[in-house]
Image (cartoon, helix red, strand yellow):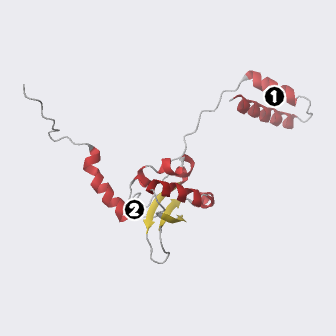
Amino acid sequence: MPPRRTTTKGFKRTNSLLSQQIRKASETRGFAQSRLLTHWAEIAGEATAAISRPVEVSYGRKEGIGATLTLLTTGANAPMLEMQKEQLRARVNAVYGYNAIARVRITQTAATGFAEGRVAFDHKPKGEKPRPNPALQQKAAEAAKPVADEGLREALARLGENILNKNQS
């Protein structure tokens, strides 16, 4: 019996079909490696990826050696992202393997390109609220019992219960 020929007869992996088009589209925006776009959450971290997106890598002549990475964010998150610029630059350069990015620029405008100008960031899924533990509620209520003011006593009991729940986790 002759050995079976291994051909796909028309079936190809999606990666092999789309990789050229994705690379061409990425390169028009300055992304030499599309990994920066596809794995942004891994590179920047979940919290940073939830509030930002890489938009462009530009190689300007006036700024000297190195490229500028432009990140898109919303107005409220821009100051937080501004404080993380150096850490982001180091993480992105680790992906490239050399100091490809010299500067990180934060923009709050809706740039056109991969997301058609939309600012759509993935938000963290809300975790389940822990069920109240009656024993911890009782312990917190006992600790707040000496307080005379009812509103303050209830607030202190809730605070105590939250602290006991966190310490238990």
The three-letter amino acid code for the residue at tag 1 is Ala
Where, by quadrant of the figure, is residue 37 drawn? Answer: bottom left
Kindly give the residue lying farthest to the top in the view shown.
Answer: 135
Horizontal side of 1 relative to 20 (left or right) equals left
Kindly give the residue lying farthest to the front in the view shown.
Answer: 98
Q: Which residue is mark 2?
A: 113
Q: Secondary structure at mark 1?
A: helix
Q: Inspect this view and state whether residue 109 appears.
A: no
At x 49%, y 62%, the residue is 99
**How crowded is the residue under tag 2: few (<14 C-alpha within 10 Å), some, or many (20+)?**
some
Residue 158 or 102: which is nearer the viewer? 102
Where, by quadrant of the figure, is residue 58 drawn? Answer: bottom left
Label 1 vs label 2: CA separation? 54 Å
Q: Position of residue 146 (x, y in %)?
A: 92, 30
Q: Inspect this view and state whether residue 65 appears.
A: yes
At x 58%, y 56%, the residue is 87
* 39 in relation to 99, above or below: above
At x 47%, y 58%, the residue is 54
Q: Earlier in the sequence, mark 1 or mark 2?
A: 2
Q: Quadrant of the N terminus?
A: top left
* 20 in relation to 129, above or below: below
Residue 52 or 74: which is nearer the viewer? 52
Q: Position of residue 24 (x, y in %)?
A: 31, 60
Residue 23 or 72: which is nearer the viewer? 23
* 128 in relation to 34, above or below: above
At x 14%, y 39%, the residue is 9
Residue 25, label in figure: none
Horizontal side of 76 relative to 42 (left or right) equals right
Q: Which residue is mark 1?
A: 140
The three-letter amino acid code for the residue at tag 2 is Gly
Asked if the residue at tag 2 contacts the one at tag 1, i.e. Cβ–Cβ closer than 8 Å, the answer is no
Q: Quadrant of the C terminus?
A: top right
